[in-house]
Amino acid sequence: MSPAPKRIAILGAASAIAEAAARIWAAQGARLVLVGRSSERLEAIAADLKARGAAQADALLADCAEADPTFELKRIVGMLGGLDVVLLAYGVLGDQRQLERDPDAAVGLIRTNFTSAAAWCLAVAAVLEHQRSGALLVIGSVASDRGRASNYVYGASKAGLGVLVEGIAHRLARSDARAVLIKPGFVDTPMTADIARKGALWSRPEAIGRIIVSSADRGGPVIYAPAFWRLIMLVIRNVPSTIFHKTNF
């Protein structure tokens, strides 16, 4: 007897990385609810996922940064008939120079990347803890490993989220539920389109999508994507400040 299809909710389903993961899950026959702000974009993704083999691919129109997670989760569970995996994939990169000049913009970024995401994570954790199964997957960033002049507001928002997810993973360890923080390095997506120079350290969304899908079943609580970023960030974290402050990255 074949296993039941995974019931998966994707928050920020229109992102390139989320869509790449969704395509893999679709090919496995998963049931999916896609949450995002653009009905046209979500419907197009849903149609593509159904063509790829998804048992269900429904759009749920909601601004994840503004929505009530507890209320929306009830809707998601109703649409799927249960919940096995939640992927939190939304967030904003921001322009560091603008964020430094405009505290309101900085607060807005933090509210999206940390405050609203934390509310979602806690709401999902409560569901998974109650049912003693399932996985919360959260996309963080290697930018959270050390504050750098080029993106420290973004990095700080992801650092706070990372600590929260690690704490949830510790909380859920007493059950069969899991929480996993996925920390990509440079990924070639529309979010990073303005960065002209892309080299060997850059990954495609499809590669990160494969790592996300595998993390639903094993690994964690922190996964660097790809794995070589763990070593890179270990070195960066341990560079003495006297040397680090002379760099521009």
Image (cartoon, helix red, strand yellow):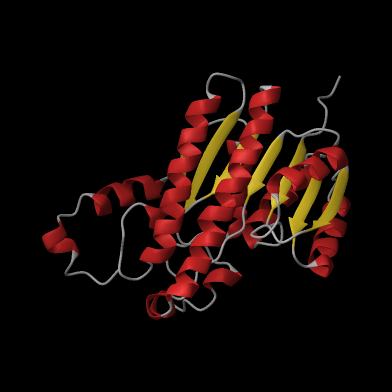
* Left or right position of 179 against 4: left
Say whether residue 67 is visible. Answer: yes
Q: Which of 131 and 249 is in front in this view?
A: 131
The residue positioned 53% from the left and 38% from the top of the image is 180
- Which residue appears at 82% of the width and 55% of the height? 60
Taking the image as shown, residue 36 lies to the left or right of residue 220, namely right
Residue 69 placed where, x, y %? 69, 47
Q: Quadrant of the N terminus?
A: top right
Number of numbered discs present? 0
Q: Residue at x 55, y 47 (%)?
A: 118
Q: Where is residue 111 in the image (x, y as percent from the top left)?
A: 53, 60
- For image coordinates 21% across by 69% down, the residue present is 247
Quadrant location of residue 133? top right
Q: Residue 6 versus residue 39: which sits nearer the camera? A: 39
Q: Is the residue 52 above or below the residue 196 in the image? A: above
Is residue 225 at all visible to an observer of this figure? no
Q: How far across and down, in percent of the image, does residue 190 sit?
A: 60, 71
Name the residue nearer the viewer: 199 or 104: 104
